[in-house]
Amino acid sequence: MKGKRIISLVVGAMLSTGILAGCQKSEPTQGAGNNTDSVKGDPITFTFFNGFGNATQFPDDNDFTNWVKEQTGVTIKVEYLAGDLNTKVGVMLASGDYPDFIYGWDAHQKFVDAGAAVPLNDYIEKYGTNIKKYQEPILKKSTQKDGKIYFIPPYREGVNNATASGGFYVQKRVLEEAGYPKITTLDQYFNILEDYKSKHPTTDGSSTIGFSVISDPTAFFTITNPGGALAGYSNDGILQFDPKTITGKLYANNDSSKKYWTKLNEEWNKGMIDPEAFTQKIDQYMSKLATGRVLGFFDYGWRLSNVQNSLHQQGKDEYQYVAFPVVWDNSIVDRYQLPSTPITRDGISISTSCKDPVRAFKFIDWLMSEEVQKRINWGVKDKDYNVDSNGKMYRTPEQREQLKNQDYIKKTGIGMFGYPWPVNSINAKYSDGNYWMPSGDPDEIAANYTDSDKKVLEKYGVKTWGEMFHPDKGNPWGEAWDVKLPDGSNEQLTNTKINELMQEYVPKMIMAKSSSEFESLWNKYTSEINKLDVKGLEQFITNAIQERVKQWGTGESK
């Protein structure tokens, strides 16, 4: 399913369960616009559960949280996800006791369905000066069937061309030795990797790995999504959608998925694929990428910033990775570089356990004010960025370099209240004309590239990594992977079973010793899928997407 595309904010995070302190629960009343004075008050500690498994884990005590406390009296204590998300959410729901703020990622609807999230409509109307100003276009899209808004989505539309959304990655050293070839098909891709590995069987004293995958259940989409991407489909979860008819079909047993897994089986038997691919965990996979031993892989850009920065800090720029829009053949238009879309499935909610929901909402709205957003996204003036005589915000080479250091990021708290908290579009501008975030500023995009980056970009005749891909304006339905399947429903059970079957059979197929063994496993796998109510699942998600398009008033894909 899901390789969720998340725009390149510094992926933020929150709290470890803390002591709740605060005022009595209050009801919304007509009040002043949202500013520092409106949220400031007696010291209060809000707790926050961040269910995003890939969140950067900031310490509670950092420069940004200390500044927030000085400005507002608010302290945030973050609990980061440890272990299985659904298990954690289930325990919270069973207890009926929640942190003040909750973010459940792809399990967030469970909080809403259980009545754990406070309706925000009245708060938005009375206190949401900034929320309405910057988020109103997408609030309709996240409104539930009962007409209530229970969460503020984490981001808005916008293409981040500073980086690749995802694709088939290749190391720079491989590209250089191959003469910076055009890579458009999977055969071309693996031929280049095979050739390099045969000439360089070791890397820094360890065996070179041609291609790695991660089969951890939380990242299994990196094995199952490529079949659709190769065929020119956008990432819509368990289904692939025809943009003309807006109908979805299961990809798990289609020809393109089989073709991709067949190719991986061939590469496995050539010794190209990481022998630990189906036993390693995410942290082991990421650590392995950061050593520079791995020549290529399929993944998503939002998961790789730490790997790329680590290689740079080690002085191994030639081991960094470049993404390519690989497809089956030249007749297919790639759809990798889609804009980030409003998430209709999740966002920041105020829980029914919150001690002061009014102040909590005012705090969210305050975070969306321009002054605070500059601090979140750019940092501290004259420390993390400067302003020239024309009022243009910019960074020096030294500032850009220090912001690649994770220790510095965590100490300063830059980006802590980016994703999954509400932000503006990556391409938006402040009232003074500056870009909302550095990753949307063309000057900063260009300046942030290393000499190594610029060399590769020049060789391919582009100015940004995003320009390596076909420009895409997205789908009229956003992304179908955020359609909520009702708990306990036949559709949810079918979806769960399909994912279980993929996780059981796909690794076996890839590791099959012969094509006949692969075919035998494929037949068993598809036979099991055929026993399920696939048509019911397809129809449910298709109906939801068609209803969404009708509600949003959007048309065909662009």
Image (tube, rainbow, N blue to C red):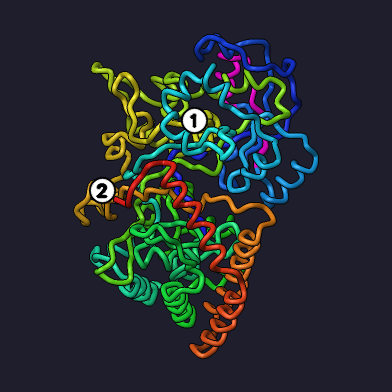
Mark 2 in CB contact with mark 1 (< 8 angstroms): no
Amino acid residing under circle 1: Ile
In the image, taking residue 260 as reference, residue 44 lies left or right, namely right
Camera-side residue of 269 and 165: 165
Quadrant of the rendered structure where residue 24 is?
Answer: top right
Rounded to the nearest whole Å, what is the CA distance between mark 2 and mark 1? 26 Å
Q: Residue under label 2, please give it.
A: 454
Quadrant of the rendered structure where residue 509 is?
Answer: bottom right
Element marked by disc 1:
loop
Q: Earlier in the sequence, mark 2 or mark 1?
A: 1
Report the span colored magenta.
62-80
Residue 249 % position (x, y)? 46, 66
Element marked by disc 2:
helix
Q: Residue furthest bottom?
A: 516
Amino acid residing under circle 2: Lys
Q: Which mark is residue 414?
A: 1
* Image position of 96 with respect to 279: above or below: above
